[in-house]
Amino acid sequence: MLLTDYFRSEKDATWDIGVQCGVQHGVIRLPETEDFDLTDKSHWQQVHKRFTDFGITPVIVEPMPNCVHDHIKAGDEKRDESIEQVIKMLPIMEELGLESICFNWMAHIGWLRTRSDIVERGGAKVTEFNIKDFKPTDAKITAKELWDNYEYFLKAVIPVAEKHNIKLALHPDDPPRPQLGDVGRIMISRENIEKAIYDIVPSDNLGVTFCQANYYIMGENVEELIEKWAKKIFFVHFRNTVGCPDHFRETFHDNGALDMAALIRAYKKNGVDVPIRVDHVPTMAGEVSTLPGYDALGRMFAIGYLKGILQATDLQ
Ligand SMILES: [Mn+2]
């Protein structure tokens, strides 16, 4: 598997820590400032060069930039112009050697936690989702609208992704609940994800970002899913948790419900040889949190742990 990490487009400590831990490939977040034009190759080249100059080769874009993705998922009046921008991104990605884009189908509310001060091992802090603490917003969308918008997007974009050999890697909803207030959610179960990746617009370029812990939270047997979906897993989020859709929390990567070494053995056994990155780490002693789940020290531990398992499994 290809060890990667998640890097914001402006250099911060996670760039240094990733490279110091031996990460050479990047899952990159594009700039979200107004002066970055998604359809302008020279803008991409500047970002790409910043990474390569630092020793990081970008391989995946995550997430699909919200400035276009939000309109596409919500199906609002800016949907078509946003899809046009995505279509123009794909040849630029091809030219720069970026193989996949990680996208999701959560409209109005993205990945969501209700607390960020839950105590993990040794006093480290992790995030939690508890439906009892959830405060609904004014946003509204139905499951039917989400499916219609998803189909509209695939019909427009999949032919272009195929032409430029870019993979679209669908991330499941987090939390995987059917409803958050009046906001419907559809990528919440094995059955729905299978409908999304196999049935609507069948394509070798459409598959999943396999965010392991989400499937455990859904109640699935994660090792069985790896076997069943092997050819559809384009990218792995190495993540551990405890709980269920209404109430779960993150953990250290070696301290949750999933047997992480067994999962890596399952990827190997089923020929899933794709980029992998750690996901949702604890905030550790002495750290001032900038974004709970994405702080630097927990990443350092998680990357080392992942790297050790990959080496012990002859995958690195
Ligand atoms: Mn994830």
Image: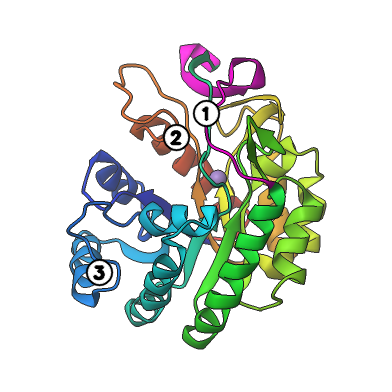
Whether residue 28 is visible to the viewer of this picture, yes or no, is: no
Mark 3 nearby-residue class (10 Å; few <14, some 14–19, many ≥20): some
Q: In the rendered image, which quarter is residue 294 located in?
A: top left
Disc 2 residue type?
Phe
Mark 3 vs mark 2: in front: 3
Say whether marks 1 and 3 touch (CB < 8 Å): no
Left or right: where 198 falls relative to 285: right
Q: Is mark 1 within 8 Å of ligand 1?
A: no
Q: Magenta span covers which residues?
A: 121-142
Crowdedness near tag 1: few (<14), some (14–19) or many (≥20) residues, C-alpha within 10 Å: few
Q: Which residue is rendered at x = 62% and y = 35% of the image?
A: 240
Q: Secondary structure at mark 1?
A: loop
Looking at the rendered structure, the secondary structure element under dot 2 is helix
Q: Amino acid at mark 1?
A: Thr
Whole-angstrom CA distance, mark 1 to mark 2, is 36 Å
Q: For label 2, count other residues whose C-alpha is less than 10 Å away and answer few (under 14), some (14-19) or many (20+).
A: some
Per the rendering, the mark at residue 301 is 2
Q: Is residue 276 magenta?
A: no
Compared to 221, does 91 lie above or below?
Answer: below
Choose between 295 and 84: the one closer to the eye.
84
Front residue (pair 64, 277):
64
Q: Which residue position is annotated with label 3? A: 44
Which residue is at a point 58% across and 55% down the rendered structure image?
Answer: 236
Q: Position of residue 155 (x, y in %)?
A: 60, 76
Where on the picture, by quarter, is residue 80?
bottom left
Image position, residue 150 (x, y; %): 62, 62
